[in-house]
Image (cartoon, helix red, strand yellow):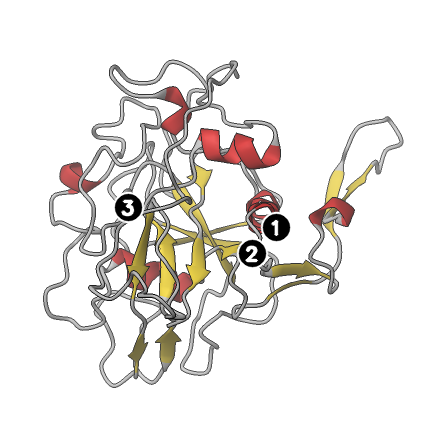
Amino acid sequence: MKKMKMAFLALATLALLATGCGGGGGGSDDDDATPSSGSTTTSIPAGFMAVPGATFDGTTAITGSEVFIAGRTVTIPSLLVCDHEVTQAEYQSVMGSNPSSFSSSPASGETQANRPVEMVSWYDAIMYCNKRSSAEGKTPCYALDGNTNTSTWNTINEIDDNGNGEVDELEEVGNITCDFSANGYRLPTEAEWEYLARGGNLTNSGQTTYSGDDDIGSVAWYDGNSGSKTHEVKKKNPNGKGLYDMTGNVYEWCWDWWSSSISASTPPTGVASGSDRVFRGGGWGSDASDYAYRAKRTPHSRYYYLGFRVACFRSE
């Protein structure tokens, strides 16, 4: 893991301000994204971008990528993708609390509530997805042992090995599955995330070093410009798909189990099991990270450099 310059800030009361990652209106890179009367095409909510799908056929590997490799076929579905990382306001409105370390003292001119949420585990992220899906009348994507109702989930056993009343060990419980055809919110797969970060470009022509530009400072908050803190989302330039902060601000959880050796036979949604989940991108406290950078953490881990963004399957 790249070096993090960490300085914990005390949690403070958060004043909620909406940033519009789901509601009426919105943007798209497709001319036909807004349906006409009688169309079944999914409308585009505010704060989301419609990203058409594509297939990488594995004929030519993308240089530097460990995901889009020779011999591997990966089909990316059409998606609705939140153009920003989930904010503290959005997370609190769904989950009822704000766990973020950076919960006060935003940079000058920035709105505290619109900073990305962090200190969220992979489990926290998928619970947010299901709860938000249910609240908005969408079909939840995630199930624990076949059950999508998060109020009944117990994803972690807290084990007191020493009998001293303190948690000594965390143990994952049950089998988490994802219905990728459901219309609810979910984390991108690792392949989807890299496709989005590359602006939908699955060739070796026209690639940039970072998501949207060769100049890291124009598209990302990292240790060279962040001032050792997170920043309000959407303050840097977006990439070619209209997505912000893909290689900076906070790292982002993905669906996949970690594999150190993706092969031609690895499914597009990743390996079937593991002990760590993938996260991608770049962070406020790290050196500049290109969009091929991969990392892992246990799914119950919480760090103040790690957040997430959501996506939805888009029917056309």
Distance of label 1 from label 3 (alpha carbons): 30 Å
Marks 2 and 3: in contact by CB < 8 Å? Answer: no
Which quadrant would the C terminus be assigned to in this image?
A: bottom left
Mark 1 belongs to which amino acid?
Ser
Mark 2 belongs to which amino acid?
Lys
Q: Residue at x 24, y 17 (%)?
A: 109
* Above or below: residue 125 compared with residue 114: below
The answer, for residue 292, to whether it is visible in the render is: no
Distance of label 1 from label 2 (alpha carbons): 6 Å
Q: Residue at x 69, y 57 (%)?
A: 148
Q: Which residue is mark 1?
A: 134
- In x, y percent, where is residue 35? 32, 64
Which quadrant would the N terminus be assigned to in this image?
A: top left
- In x, y percent, where is residue 151? 74, 45
* Above or below: residue 232 compared with residue 301: above
For discs 1 and 3, the disc positioned in front in the rendered view? 1
Marks 2 and 1: in contact by CB < 8 Å? Answer: yes
Circle 3 sits in a helix, a strand or a loop, which is it? loop
Q: Which residue is mark 3?
A: 247
Name the N-terminal-most of marks 3 and 2.
2
Q: Residue at x 20, y 64 (%)?
A: 31
* Above or below: residue 313 compared with residue 122: below
Distance of label 3 from label 2 (alpha carbons): 29 Å
Label 2, residues with CA under 10 Å away: few <14, some 14-19, many ≥20? some
Q: Which residue is mark 2?
A: 138
Name the N-terminal-most of marks 1 and 3.
1
Residue 176 lies in what quarter of the image? Answer: bottom right
Circle 2 sits in a helix, a strand or a loop, which is it? loop
Q: Residue at x 42, y 62 (%)?
A: 190
